[in-house]
Image (cartoon, rainbow, N blue to C red):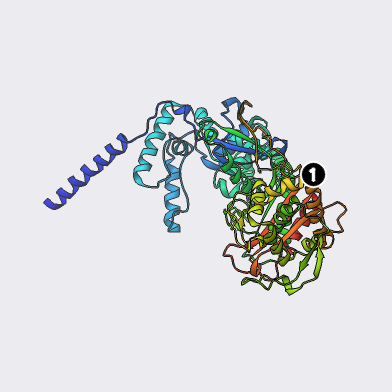
Amino acid sequence: MQTLKTITIFSFICIVCWIIFCFSTLPDLSGLGNKTRKPSISVLGNNNIIIGSLGDVYAGSINQGDIPKHLADAVVVIEDKRFYSHSGLDFRGLARAILFNIKERRYAQGASTITQQLSKLIFLNKNKNLSRKLRELVISFYIEYKYSKQEILVMYLNRVYLGSGLYGVKAASRRYFYKTPDNLTISESAILAGLLKSPSRLSPLINKTGSISRANLIVTLLFKEGLIDQKEMEKAQIELKNYEKKFNINEDVTARYFIDWVYTQTPDEVLRYKKDLLIKSTLNSYIQNTVNTAIKEETKKVDDDIQTAVVVMDYMGAIRALKGGRDWNRSKFNRATQSKRQIGSIFKTYVYLTALSIGFKLNDKVLDTPIKDNKWKPKNYGNKYEGKISLKRAFAKSSNVVAVKISEKIGRELIIRQTKKLGVISKIPNEPSMPLGVASMSLIEVVGSYGAICGKGRAIIPFGINEIVLRNGQSFWKRSPPKRKKIISNKNQKDIKKLLREVVVTGTASKLASLPFEVIGKTGTTQNNRDAWFIGCAKGYVVGVWAGRDDDKSMKNIFGSTLPLNIFNSIIKDI
């Protein structure tokens, strides 16, 4: 008996101490109405349309008068039916949830009120434990005591997460419907309210079927509760049916490789700023969607282990589209910017450009014959040799032995210097195999190097940001176009373009010869088909395509002249 009494007293003391601890560790409740969230960076494409965001996207607060009645009704009817009658804790809802969870033998249903959800949004972390639940209740009672139901609902709608990186109904209304909350229809309000259950999964930009299905449930509930009449219900249901055709694939995901890269390009002083920012980027949504479609269509019959990356850049260096892999959801690794792979015969462009710069002519004769006087004996693809041929022909057929002979004759150091002038920053090994592309480079680096060749003969550094502005439109940072000297003479540039054109007319990229506009470019395939490349220029763009495996294993029957060339062809025809 004495033992039981001791245990009871000890337990009581522990509970009291625990309650005191929970109360003493409550967050500061002063200025509750002004609590906000972390700043966000939103990335704008052409036409100033948001293509995605980093951080918490917030478009500002709304007032009670900005919330249409049907939006408030939709949120309350699906989230907290007795919101206007309870004092922060819904005992009936709690009892129902407990019984249901016991029946299911798992946590299947919650009973948090809107007030409790607001307390979590503002003050508490996501840890699920008894201490946090007690603090949550205390904060909820305080909120109910200090604020009216309308004020609580406004604070909740200003902070709640609504999918696709969006916080608050103002940001969600603008992103999903291109309007302010006070102009929302019943159907649109139902879509927003439906997101509260699972915002990431039910975002209409990701899962339009699930989003609209839940919105239909809410419209039906609004009718059953007498909050809308039958005519309003039927109109909303028709609008929801039409929305299934409106929402497209999530731009935030399809351009996500570009968004991630742009973030790495954002100046440090900008990232340290504590206010919401808008990045006016160089991305063209149409070109990006064209790239996405081309990769999807051309890789349908390709092994899932084979990855692809694409960069589209204009001749001034602005990146208009970027894809760092087949699916950002499956792999965040950006193969267009983070991966460095051997570039194969793409490097021959640098070799021949250097040769032209010291006086070589397009019709100079070279020997396309096996090299026998070295320990290292490079071979042409298929062991095919043509004897004495022109420089133009050697480049078009991508002769390995001719590239090596030219390299040794003019000097590897000279080629390395010329390549560096084009903007290449990766290490280039000074060894006999250098002209065959043993150097590893990123796709965006190679594309940038072709900017000078295809453009105005000046070195190009790829960029993705034009300007960064505050939410009020005030400019915070702006790109200043650099002034660079010409590094390729007009004559040499004309000649290297002729060589690249010959690749398309008679060489390894002859599939493109029938296009109704001029294309120049170069294919590249590394040893054992580990990497396949095509870099092409047309219509004012440099388009680079790479294919390979992340494990660096061989790809069967994939060369620069197959998958990369096909992807390029699909892209360039449509942009």
Q: Is residue 339 left or right of residue 487?
A: left
Q: Quadrant of residue 365?
A: bottom right
Q: Is residue 242 visible?
A: no
Q: Position of residue 565 (x, y in %)?
A: 75, 60
The foreground one among 91 and 193 is: 193
Q: Is residue 408 above or below residue 464?
A: below
Counting from the top left corner in percent of width and height, residue 81 is at 52, 39
The amino acid type of the residue labelled 1 equals Asn
Can residue 477 be seen in this snapshot? Answer: yes
Give coordinates of residue 88: x percent, y percent.
43, 35
Question: Residue 504 at what x, y percent from top left?
Answer: 81, 59
Give the camera-side residue of 288 and 239: 288
Residue 293, by quadrant, is bottom right
Furthest residue in direction left, as rendered: 2
Q: Residue at x 44, y 53 (%)?
A: 107
- Residue drawn 65% across the image and 43% down it: 461
Secondary structure under the numbered disc 1 in the rendered image: helix
Q: Which residue is mark 1?
A: 490
Left or right of 502, for residue 441: left
